[in-house]
Image: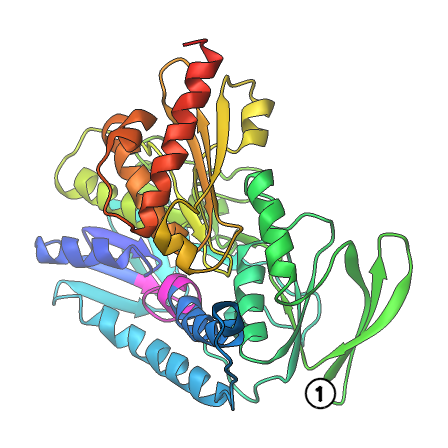
Amino acid sequence: MKKYDLIIIGAGRASNLAATAGKAGKKVAIIEKSTLGGTCPNRGCVPSKLLLGYAHVANAIKESERHFIDSSINSIDIKKIFEKTNNYISKIDGIYENKFNENVDIYKGIGSFVSNNVIKVNDEQLTAPKIVIATGTKPIKAPHEKAWTSDDIFPLLGDIPKSITIVGAGFIACELASFFSSVGIKTTLLVRSQRILSNEDEDISAIFKDEFSKKMNILFDTAIKTTKYENNQFNLILESKDATTKEHQSDALLYATGRESNTNSLNLENTSIQIDERGFIKRDKFFETNAKGVYVVGDASGKHMLQHAAAYEINHLGKILLEDCKEALQFKYMPHAVFTEPEIASVGITEQKAKEQNIKYVTSTTNWLASAKAMSTRLHYPVTKFLINPENYEILGCHMIGPESSTMMHQVLAVMHINNDVRHLKEMLYIHPALSEALLPASVEAVKEVEKYNNL
C-alpha cells in the first residue's frame, strides 16, 4: 500500500491544492477519472464562454440595423469555431499536469474508498491521513441514448448539427441555446413552464424572457412526449400544457435539466461519511466529513455549485491543511452571472426570497439610460434592481440585466465586502460616461426608497 501525506480525488479546482501541497514538500496523490482540470476548463465555464464570444460577434452584426448600419453575414465557419474550441480543450490536461512537481503523483482512474483512510484506484491501494473529495457534479443523464448533455458538446466530435432541440430553462440551457442560435444552427428551446431562469429575481427573469424570446424559438409549457431516433434525426412528439401535441424534428437533442451528485462511484458505504437526501456529501464548517481527516469541497458538497466558490473553498482548505488555519470560511456574498444576451448578474437575495423569509426590505429598479455608454448600445431594457435593508442601508440583493452586467456587478460586490452600505455607491465618483455610471442613479433611487420608508 502506498502512503501519502494527502490524497485528492478529483483534479478540477483541487489541482491547485495538490500543486501547493507538493511545493510545500508534501507527498500528494491526485486521482482523476477523466482529464485534469475538471468540468470548468474542459466541459463547462471556459469553453462555453469561448463559444459565446463568437455568438456575441454574430449577434452584433445581425443587430447592426439598430445602429443604422446595414450589414449581413456572408458565412459562419462553424466547423472552424468548434475546431478552435476543441483545440483549446485538448491542451488543458497538459497545462494542469505542468502545475505539479515531483512530489505529486497523478493517477488516471476512478478512486473509491476501501475504508475511511484507504483509497483504491486501478487495483492499487493508497492511504493518507488527509483525504480530499473534490469530485464535482455531472449532468443529469439524458433519457435517450442518442441525446446529448453538456458533456457531449466539449469537445464536439463528429458532424455539427444543422438543427438542435434543447430541453431546459436554466443558465446552461440558455447559454448553449444562445450560441447555437446565434451562429445559424436552427435552435428550439423547450421549457416546461412559463418561467425561464426561475432562480433569478422575478422582475429580471421577466425582462430576460421578453428579450431572449426575440432571438430564438422558445416553446413554453412544452415537454417531450415521445422520442424516436431514425436516419440520424430525432423525431419528437411535443406535448403542451393543454395536452395538444405536435411533431418536431431536429438533428440533435440536448438535455440541460440540471446536475447531480458525482459521488456514486466512491463506495462511501465503506466509510462513515454521510450524504444528504440529494446524494451530496455532508460536512462541517471546516469542510470535514463524518470521517476524521476526510474533507469535501466544491460541488460534491452540494453547496454554492459555482466554479468561483469551489476555487475559494480549495484556497481556504489549503490554509487549514497546510498553514494550520483555525478559522472557518464564511461566504459573505455569493455572486453569479448568466452569459447570454441579455447578460444577467446577481448577488444576494431575490425579492421572492425576501418575501418568503419575511425579510424587511425596500426595492428600487432603475434603467441605465443616464449613462451615455449605455445609451450608445441603443438597448432600452437594461436595469439595476436593488433590495435594501431600510434600517441600515445594507444591500440585501442586487440584480442586473444588460451588457457587461457581470463586470459591473464587481463594483457592487466591492462595497458589499468592505462596508455594505448602498450610500457608498451613491457618494462615489464615477468616470463619466462609463457604463458603470448607471449605478449612480440606481443607488440614488435606492437611498430615496429607504428615506421614503423611514419618512426622512
Q: Which percent across, then down, holds residue 448?
A: 42, 22
Q: Which percent across, then down, holds residue 232?
A: 71, 87
Identify whether 50 is placed above or below 168: below
Q: Is residue 36 magenta?
A: yes
Q: Which percent across, then down, holds residue 68?
A: 49, 72
Identify whether 452 is placed above or below 339: above
Residue 117 appears anywhere in the view: no
The crowd level at tag 1 (other Cα within 10 Å; few <14, some 14-19, many 20+) is few
Q: Give the residue displayed 49% in from the left and 49% down from the top.
A: 382
Q: Is residue 280 magenta?
A: no
Q: Which amino acid does label 1 sit on?
A: Asn
Q: Give the residue displayed 49% in from the left and 55% down from the top.
A: 262
Residue range of the region highlighted in magenta in the rendering: 31-45
Quick check: 93 left or right of 78? left
- Residue topped by disc 1: 232
Most foreground residue, 104 or 390: 390
